[in-house]
Amino acid sequence: MQRLYDFLRRHPTGVDSFWAVVLLGMGAMFVAGKGLKGSEVLGAFVTIPALCLVVALRRRAPEAMLLLAIVAGAVQLAMNFRINIADLAMLVIVYTVAAVGARWASRLALVGGLAAPALANIRWPDDYSTGWQNLVAAFFLTVPFVLAWVLGDSLRTRRAYYAQLEERAARLEKEREAQSKVAVAAERARIARELHDVVAHNVSVMVVQADGAAYVLDTAPDQAKQALETISGTGRQALAEMRRLLGVLRTGEPGDGGGEYVPQPDVGQLDDLIEQVRGAGLTVDFRVEGSPRPLPSGVELTAYRIVQEALTNTRKHGGPDVGATVRLTYGEAELDLLVEDDGRGAQQELYEAGGADGLGHGLIGMRERVGMVGGRLDAGPRPGGGFRISAVLPLKTAS
């Protein structure tokens, strides 16, 4: 049955043509049994085939078939060919146009359906009925046309509603896909910033220590050994942070430790960071002012990464004998972060246009991090020499 149903749905004109042939046969039987004369015969030969054609092509050309049905009805009235079985085609075309035709055709079909019974009653009144009875008969003949139009229009409305639901579902699906892409892009950008901070800082420390170890390897083996230990410790720290970042990309793989990764750094780990930088040969003056208190995790991570990137840039661009100052000030509603150095400073293109210089993305990452927590960042040369980075991060009560 399902195959037959699918076949019929794929060939609607064939189905309509079958019913048109059936209607033609019934119309022929009607004509043969009535014994028509004169103009009635001509009317039958014109209107019955025309109305059968209306049924056959109603779904392929509903508007044209409606006009053909109107013409056939006019010919039927003119030729005095009374109401017959073929007139069922008028009900069919009224329903079809109301369901799938143009709006003007639907309205015309409704007007024609209301007018046809009245015109037929006027053309062929019942001699044995009063005027009132003829009026009631015309009314009851009108009801099928109205019901056919209402049924077709209801089907049109339901189809439009389903189409709207499908369009809305498709639009929502596209919006979900777009939101997913945005979320993926944001996550990739976050991971890229984290990887940059981890690699830039730790590898920079390791390079400095390796150069120092190579320089004093023959003259001061103890210092070289200490430098190598610093390289080892920095490497382990870098590996731990990179495992945490790569763990974000995992999706519950077997043996991944149940998703337990190294926690993200916060301002409480700035002391360790400063000591690590000092061990690499950079003089750093670190002070905390105000009353330390719990901070949102985003602010904690942003503050740590800004200090880490700023000190890395100082070590890379500050020149020999450079010193740095780090100030962390807790205010009532903001966390002020100031990192300054007295070195030769970075090249101007390193901080202009957000740091988009092709040599690195440290300042770009700083601005993105600060923007994500709703803060402000100011970076540039310091009066009197050196470089200055100032960040203001809004504070919220940690839940």
Image (cartoon, grey):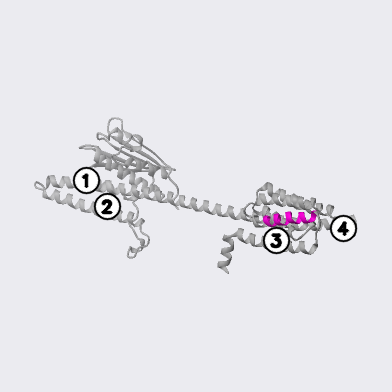
Kind of residue at badge 1: Ala
Q: Mark 1 points at which residue?
A: 280
Q: Is residue 330 visible?
A: no
Circle 3 SS class: helix
For the residues bearing labels 1 and 4, Cβ distance under 8 angstroms: no
- 3D distance between C-alphas at marks 1 and 4: 115 Å
Determine the image quadrant of residue 212.
top left
x, y (%) of residue 118?
A: 81, 52
Residue 45 drawn in magenta:
yes
Give, as a single range, the part of the protein colored magenta: 39-54
> Comparing marks 4 and 2, which lies closer to the viewer?
4
Q: Nearest the camera: 294 or 348?
A: 348
Please identify the residue farthest to the front as the structure is shown: 38
Q: Residue under circle 4?
A: 126
The kind of residue tagged 2 is Ala
Q: Which of marks 1 and 4 is in front?
A: 4
Cα–Cα span, label 4 and label 2: 103 Å
Residue depicted at x 77% and y 53%:
76
Residue 266, position as x, y percentages in the image = 35, 50
Q: Residue at label 2? A: 238
Closer-to-camera residue (336/231): 231
Q: Which residue is drawn at 71% across and 52% down?
A: 69
**Residue 123 among those drawn in magenta:** no
Which of label 3 and label 2 is nearer to you?
3
Residue 1, position in %: x, y?
58, 69
Depth check: 260 or 157 in front?
A: 157
Helix, strand or loop under label 1: loop
Please tell me how crowded label 4 is: few (under 14), some (14-19), or many (20+) other residues with Cα within 10 Å.
Answer: few
Could you tell me the amino acid type at mark 3?
Leu
The residue that disc 3 covers is 24
Whether pointer 3 and pointer 2 mark residues with C-beta atoms closer than 8 Å, the reply is no
